[in-house]
Image: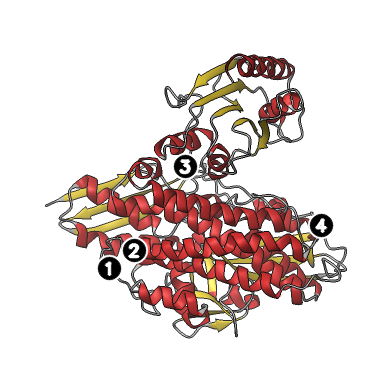
Amino acid sequence: MARRTITVDYLARVEGEGAFKVVLRNGKVENAEFRIFEPPRFFEAFLRGRAFTEAPDITARICGICPVAYQMSAVHAMENALGITVAGPLRALRRLLYCGEWIESHTLHIYMLHAPDFLGYSGAIEMARAHGEAVRRGLMLKQVGNEIMTLLGGREIHPINVRVGGFYRAPRKRDLAPLAERLKWARDAALETVRWTAGFDFPERARDYTFVALRHAEEYPFNEGRIVSNRGLDITAAQYEDYFEESHLPRSNALHARLKDGKAYLVGPLARYSLNFDRLSPLAQQAARDAGLEPVCNNPYRSIVVRAVEVLYACDEALRIIAAYEEPERPFVAAEPRAGVGFGATEAPRGLLYHRYRLASDGTIQEARIVPPTSQNQASIEEDLVNFVESFLDLPDDALRQRCEQTVRNYDPCISCATHFLRLDINRG
Amino acid sequence: MDESAPRVRVIGIGNPDRGDDAAGRRVAALLRGTLPAKIAIVEHDGEATALLACLDGVEAAFLVDACASGAPAGTVRRFDVTAAPLPQRIFPFSTHGMGLAEAVELARALGALPKHCIVYAVEGASFAAGAPLSAPVRTAVATIAERIRAEIAANI
């Protein structure tokens, strides 16, 4: 066999606009490119000159699926710059809000975007005709995530209740009680989701990834923790740029992030789970084991099961937070502006999301840096294509193309997030 | 769904702060208080899964949304989606998110599409942040409200 090219010019069932191309020569992958052609969006430039208080609402607009992640990384970075700490019930409410986003985002990906790959459908609508019960469960489960977002965030998308130091308004204990009832149903539905996805057929493929995720002393990570890897990395958010760097490649409007030694790494559910299995709740750990997952998962096709385990954890954790919730005296900790630099890293559904801000003495943002998870995963996506495609060459073209798409969708790439960046290189020859 | 809940819904879809995108919500607001109590009026942001939940268990639904298909501003179209999907040239499927067309098709696939399900689409002129409704869309909003009122009086 000579040259064989697999291209998908417009990748469906991902958030944003991207494509990929794999070139094979004599049965070997010659080149694999994941291309992002969604236009750059310049958010880092928009932030300059704005007040530090505006960052959570401006950055939330980077993504309609994971706005909470942007708000959380922004407020943590600002609080780091301003020297304040948010603890107690306000901190717990932030975790609860993040639970809502994980439930919403992961459930959308599992049921609407990724499951059709495993069950042989072109999309969720076609799948719904034969798997109506499952799709209904997925939609209702996602709805519970939306309800957390609405209650805590003020609305389902782009929450408006988050501020530096906490919230504009904290919920009453009685507001959370009906949510707990819904979450008990959701926890059962999430457990069913783990079982459902565990029954799919998975290609037996694995890679020795460098996993990177937050790790916290006690919790499965949402908002806080050190940035660690399975290769011994153990740093604070403030050290992120000492170990990771971004570069602009012509094929992508999203900057590619790599470790400074040039190696690709992986962020997201697989990394988070593999670095933090022991921090999952007993229920989530047991469900993972029953689903056939080891405490470390190197098979990216099983990421759909890992996402389901994380949804289960989010339901479980949300219930724990609601049960322990005491109303705070004030909904926020006051923050006075001062000059400084602040760093924040939190766990977006798709992985580590890093923010850095430099503030003037009046709190005006002078510089902003945002590194979203999909930017960090681009190199790993391409390496998966290079490494796995050769082993699927006996598939006919259509099936091979579909398998490549599935391989990209393992990452739940959020292309709109990834193209937020600042630099636009124009070469006019 | 609660047995006592209204089985007929008018659902106005849109963003209230984005110019003509608010058209669906304006229709809902105009109809509020003018229809029999058994008919629920809902303003909705259009997110597909929440929209689907809003259609679940409903016997008859009237959905109103703005569109941008290139027709003259204020053009009103009526679609009986129980007969055929929404045309893609008016409601293109998006990879970015799922909207009204996807919600209708998911409802159909799940057997959850109301027996009577009508979509009114109004062509917008401007979707600028903070803008008011354009004059042609303001006129169209009143027309659609009147037509829905008449349809409900005749059929429901």
Residues A354 and B87: in front is B87
Identity of the amino acid at label 2? Answer: Tyr
Residue at the location (31% across, 63% down)? A199
Drawn side of residue A140 relative to residue A8, left or right? right
Q: Which color scheme is applied?
A: secondary structure
Q: Quadrant of residue A347?
A: bottom right
Q: Secondary structure at mark 2?
A: helix
Q: Find the residue positioned furthest to the front.
A: B4
- The circle drawn on residue B146 is none
Q: How many marks?
A: 4
Q: Give the mark nearer the N terminus: 1 vs 2.
A: 1
Of badges 2 and 4, the one in the foreground is 2
Residues A273 and B68: in front is A273
Q: Give the mark nearer the N terminus: 1 vs 4.
A: 4
Real-space CA distance between mark 1 and mark 2, rounded to the nearest whole angstrom: 8 Å
| Res A247 seen here | no
Q: Circle 2 is placed at which residue position? A: A301
Q: Are marks 1 and 2 in contact (CB under 8 Å)?
A: yes
Q: Secondary structure at mark 4?
A: loop
Q: Circle 1 is placed at which residue position? A: A205
Q: Are marks 4 and 3 in contact (CB under 8 Å)?
A: no
Q: Are marks 1 and 3 in contact (CB under 8 Å)?
A: no
Identity of the amino acid at label 3? Answer: Thr
Q: Circle 4 is placed at which residue position? A: A51
Q: Find the residue positioned furthest to the left.
A: A1
Rendering coords of residue A345 (x, y %): 62, 70
Drawn side of residue A210 relative to residue A342, left or right? left
Q: Considering only vertical position in the picture, is A399 above or below A148? A: above
Q: Circle 3 is placed at which residue position? A: B95
Real-space CA distance between mark 2 and mark 3, rounded to the nearest whole angstrom: 21 Å
